[in-house]
Image (cartoon, rainbow, N blue to C red):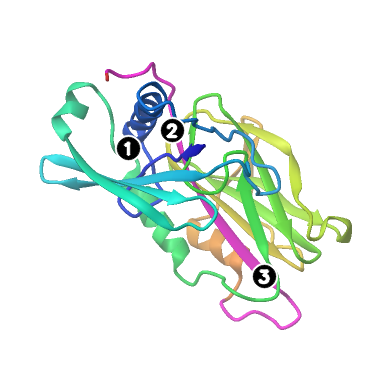
Amino acid sequence: NISLSIFNYQDTKISSPFAKNLYNNLEQKLISNSNYNIINIDEFKGNVVNKKIDYIITGNYWEEDNFLKIVVTLRDFKTGKALASVESKILKDYCINNSITYLPENFINANAKIKNFSENEIVGGDLNLEVWTNKGNNNLLFQENDTLSLYLRVNKECFVRFIYHLADGSSVLLLDDYYIGTDKVNKVYKLPEVFVCTEPFGAELLQVNAQTEKFPAIETENKYGYDFIIENFASVLEKSRGFKKIDDEMMKAENTLIITCLLYTSPSPR
């Protein structure tokens, strides 16, 4: 039993239409040519995946002159040990001629924002925050009209803030001061809200912050049924993370998920 993962561009967690097309073709070949059993996990429950999985295939791809270099690794699912790997190349012209995009249109801006999050990242501390989606927390790719469910687990009573940074540069305050009571501590909690993948498409980022006191208010404007943030990015980070030094009486935690959202298209040529 093999779990096949969506490939990422370079060492980022950003995917693309090319990666989705590659996934579909590789899945088909593994089944039709080799009779492997490919397990697609559409719903992660308790952050524990199907225990029947024996192996997992992961991969990354890089631009190398006129080619895309693809590196694929087969690992033992339980131990994580690499068992085999293979490297291959495909001409960029193939992607161009078949209108297969190997980078989201907003890659440069999205990658810069991701790097901003890695600076002064909140790590350690006594408050632990785990966040994942119905497709896990790695190699996240959603197509148009796919539904996104969110799960979390914390080890202490706290307030949680969810901010979604869209591909067009705007940010939406999904949930604010969402209270996790003592009855939900150390338990998997699925948020009641379910979201649908729609435009704008590209690399997007879910920012989740937790702290033991309520958050400072963020200015928003309600449009299309969502609370769009009208403050600048630096202000949003400061009001969600606070200052780097944390008061001994207030505990904080942070988690981010990178999500690639794609417009649905019919399968590309093989």
In this rendering, the answer to whether 16 lies above or below 128 is above
Q: Nearer the viewer, residue 231 or 112?
A: 112
Of marks 2 and 3, which one's residue comes earlier in the chain?
2
Q: Amino acid at mark 3?
A: Lys
The residue under label 3 is 252
Badge 2 crowding class, 10 Å Cα cut-off, few under 14, some 14 to 19, many 20 or more, is many
Residue extending farthest left: 65
Say which residue appears at 49% left-offset and 39% top-offset.
3
Secondary structure at badge 3 equals strand
Badge 1 crowding class, 10 Å Cα cut-off, few under 14, some 14 to 19, many 20 or more, is some
Left or right: where 251 falls relative to 179: left
Q: Quadrant of the C terminus?
A: top left
Disc sitting over residue 105 in the figure:
1
Q: What's drawn in magenta, residue-wise?
A: 244-269
Q: Amino acid at mark 2?
A: Phe
How far is disc 1 from disc 2 in space, using C-alphas?
8 Å
Q: Is mark 1 in CB contact (under 8 Å) with mark 2? A: yes
Question: Is 255 contained in the magenta span?
Answer: yes
Of marks 1 and 3, which one's residue comes earlier in the chain?
1
How far is disc 2 from disc 3 in space, using C-alphas?
31 Å
The residue under label 2 is 201
Say which residue appears at 55% left-offset and 54% top-offset.
78
Question: Is 252 contained in the magenta span?
Answer: yes
